[in-house]
Amino acid sequence: MSQESVRVVRVALFSHVAATLFKLVTGVITGSAALLSEALHSLLDVLNQAVLFSSARKGRAAGDHVYAYGHGKTRYLVNLWSSVGLFSIGCGLGLAWSIYALLAVSREQPLLDGANWTLLLAVAGGLLIQGYSFFLAARDFVGRMMVERQRNPFTYLLGCGDVTLAVIVVQSSAGLLGLMMAGAGAVATLLTLNPLWDALAALGIAVLMGWVAYYLGYLYMRYLTDVRDRSAETALRELAEARRAVERCDHIHSIILDDHRTLVFAEIELQQEAMVSGLLTRISGAKKQLLQQLPQAQRGETRALAFVTARATVEATLTRAEAIILELEQSLREQMPQVAEVSIRVRGISAFELPEPPVRRAPPTQDAEVVSP
């Protein structure tokens, strides 16, 4: 989680604490079922963001003998339980409360007494409190979209490089939408003097909490079910196709560990000319280095020379293959910073084909200079 995301989480946490207290007090004063539902919504936001902030530290822990690739998935598992559990409970409580409000209206004993301008002031105050948090999260989110040249915000929410920021954007957006529902219910109640609209707004807020539970659960499951990083796979395929040393690159797979780390696996077939060109020179250099490691008396032995030649051939071949793979891995990491590890297996070299001999061109001739008498 970046420093900017930490700041956004802290601002969102404090704003939702203030919004919870504000909605609760004004909801009790006005008797609005919608505002009390929104108070519950904001309370769940506070609890979920507290878990989100604390689990982010746990997720940054380095790998150990139990978790080879760190504790990133533990973070998502905890957040999955928190978001789905809290907002599902909130949805259930909100539905029960809205049904109670609807029954009270049907018995002509509404919780909200007709026209109440205090309710509109309460909604306006809540919008101001949560609006600042939403502004910070949206600014950071849109900025990243522009840098990565993304146009669809709904698609980018699922592929955002910082899942913490995506969660804050979802919760802040849902908080503002819930307040707008409460405001719409208040306006309708003022215009019609019928508190039924306030109860219906409370019902809509309960359904909204259920949607938040579903969406956050879907978002976290993306990082818990070994979802592939299609962008990294495409980048590796394009990089391999652009290199003459690689004949073919297939069986490309990837696993998203967390929002900052992806593992990529692939198999490549090396191009014949790239491996053979200059091979004899590399073998000769490796052979000289190996012979220097032997005593002077053994350097002329037939058995030693045969073994050194074979060893030098293997070393020269592996060194060339490793250089091609290393250059491909470095290019992928530069283009895709989220790639933490790349595992490329060499399946072999392209089919044997004797290259055509180079065409030797005759040197250009100069026409004799003719001197007129």
Image (cartoon, rainbow, N blue to C red):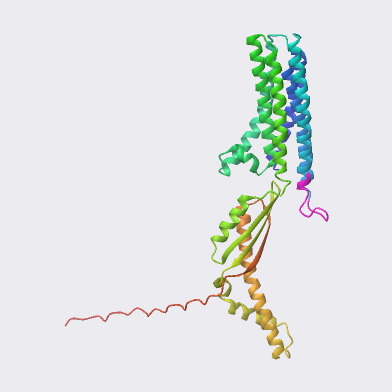
Residue 189 colored in magenta in the image: no
Q: Position of residue 16 (x, y in %)?
A: 73, 28
Query: Which quarter of the image is occupied by the N terminus?
Result: top right
Residue 68 colored in magenta in the image: yes
Q: Position of residue 293 (x, y in %)?
A: 72, 82
Q: Tell me if residue 22 can be seen.
A: no
- Looking at the rendering, the stretch of residues picked out in magenta corresponds to 62-74
Q: Residue furthest left?
A: 373
17 horizontally vs 321: left or right: right
Q: Residue furthest right?
A: 65
Q: Position of residue 230 (x, y in %)?
A: 62, 50
Residue at image location 79% in from the left, 29% down from the top: 89
Q: Position of residue 7 (x, y in %)?
A: 71, 36
Q: Quadrant of residue 292?
A: bottom right
Residue at image location 71% in from the left, 17% down from the top: 199
User: Which one is in front, 190 or 122?
Assistant: 190
Magenta part, dominant SS: loop
